[in-house]
Amino acid sequence: MGFKIFSGNSNTLLAREIAKQLGQTLSKVEIIRFADSECRVRIEEDVVDQDVFIIQSVSNPVDENLMELLLLGDAVKRGEARKVIAVLPYHGYARQDRVHRMGECLSASVVTKLIESIGFDKLITVELHSDAISGFFKIPLIHLSGLSLFKEEIEKNKDDVVIVSPDAGAAKRAQSFAEMLDLPLSYIEKKRDLNQAHKIISMKVVGDVKDKRAFIVDDVIVSGGTLINAAYLLKQKGAKQVIAAATHADFVGGADKILQDSPIDKIWVTDTIPVHEDRRFAKLTVFPIASIIASAMKKMIK
Ligand code: R5P
C-alpha cells in the first residue's frame, strides 16, 4: 500500500512542486481532447489499493478543468484505488453559492453534486469564497487558507496597518484575519449590478483609513474591478498605501495591465492558479502555496 498523485492540466507546476515536497513525482496520465473538444482520460499506472490524490484547480477554463477532474476521478476509481482524494487548490463555481435573482441556478451546489457523484472520499481545497459551500458537501472537506502566507509578511511591519474587507461577503475572512494579526478592520460596502457581470454600482468605506496602510483581503481576483475600485476609494479617504492580497489570481485578459496601472501599490496572490510569465507585472508578488497543501496531504498519508 502507498500513495500516488495525479494532476490534471490546470496547474501542473504546482502539482509537481507538491509531489516533490512529498518525495514523489506525478503519476502518468494521458489526457487528450478530441476534435469536437470532448476530453478523454487514461491513467497509465496501477492504483489498486493505493491512496490517490488528484490535484486540479477548477480555474479558467473552468468547465474544461472541472471535466478533467471528474474524468480523472472516475479513471482512478475504476482502477480500484483504496481512497481517492480530490485536491482543488482553487474551487471554481464557489462564488455562485446563492440564488441572487428569481430563476437562477445554484451552481455551487450542482458542482458539489457532480464532484461527489464520482465517489471521492475527501476533498482538500483552499480559500473558498464562503463557508456556505462547505455545507453543500457530504464528504469530509479540508478547507485550507493562503492567508497565513500574507500574515507572515504583514507581521514584519504592522505600523499604521488597517485590514480592509472589499465587500460584505469577504467580511468574515477579513475580520478573522484582522483578529489574527491584532489589527483594526475597515469595510467597504459594495453594490453590484446583478444584471451585468463584473459591474459595480457603488462603494462606500466604513471605518478610518486616513494615513493608514490599507490591506484589502479577498479570496480571488478576476477582472481586478473590486480591488481597483476599492483602492481608488481608500486613497480618496486618505489611505497612504494600498496593498491588495487575494489567495487566487484567476486573471482575465487585461487584468494584469489595469492592476499595474491602478492606485494599488502592491498586489499579493498565491499560485493556486498558475500566473504565467506573460501575466506577471511589477506590482505583483506570487507567494508559493505548495507547502500548505503538501502538509495537509501528508497528514492523510498512512
Ligand atoms: C466577490 O464576491 C469575490 O470575493 C471577489 O471580490 C470578486 O469576484 C473579484 O472579482 P473581480 O476581480 O472581477 O472584481
Image: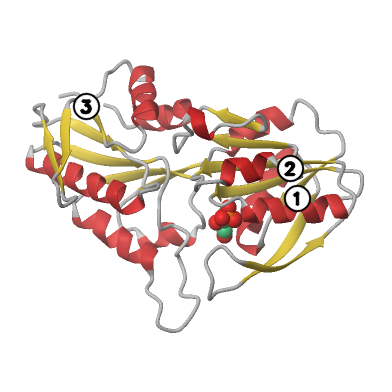
Q: Nearer the viewer, residue 188 or 276?
A: 276
Q: Is mark 3 within 8 Å of ligand 1?
A: no
Query: x, y percentage for residue 208?
Result: 88, 54
Mark 3: which secondary structure?
A: strand
Mark with earlier residue (1, 3)? 3
Colour scheme in the image? secondary structure
Report whether 294 appears left or right of 72.
right
Mark with earlier residue (2, 3)? 3
Location of residue 242 by image quarter:
top right
Residue depth check, mark 2 versus mark 3: number of the one nearer the observer: 2
Find residue 264 and name its label: 2
Q: Quadrant of the N terminus?
A: top left
Q: Using the image, determine if residue 105 lies above or below residue 122.
A: below
Find residue 267 and name its label: none
Q: Amino acid at mark 3?
A: Lys
Alpha carbon distance from label 1 to label 3: 44 Å
At x 15%, y 52%, the residue is 36
Crowding at dot 3, Cα within 10 Å, few <14 / some 14-19 / many 20+, comes out as many
At x 74%, y 29%, the residue is 155
Residue 163 seen from this side: yes
Residue that numbered label 3 is attached to: 4
Q: Quadrant of ligand 1?
A: bottom right
Q: Nearer the viewer, residue 183 or 90?
A: 90
Residue 120 seen from this side: no
Q: Amino acid at mark 2?
A: Ile
Query: x, y percentage for residue 230?
Result: 73, 54
Mark with earlier residue (2, 1)? 1
Q: Are marks 2 and 1 in contact (CB under 8 Å)?
A: yes
Residue that numbered label 1 is attached to: 231
Q: Quadrant of the C terminus?
A: top left
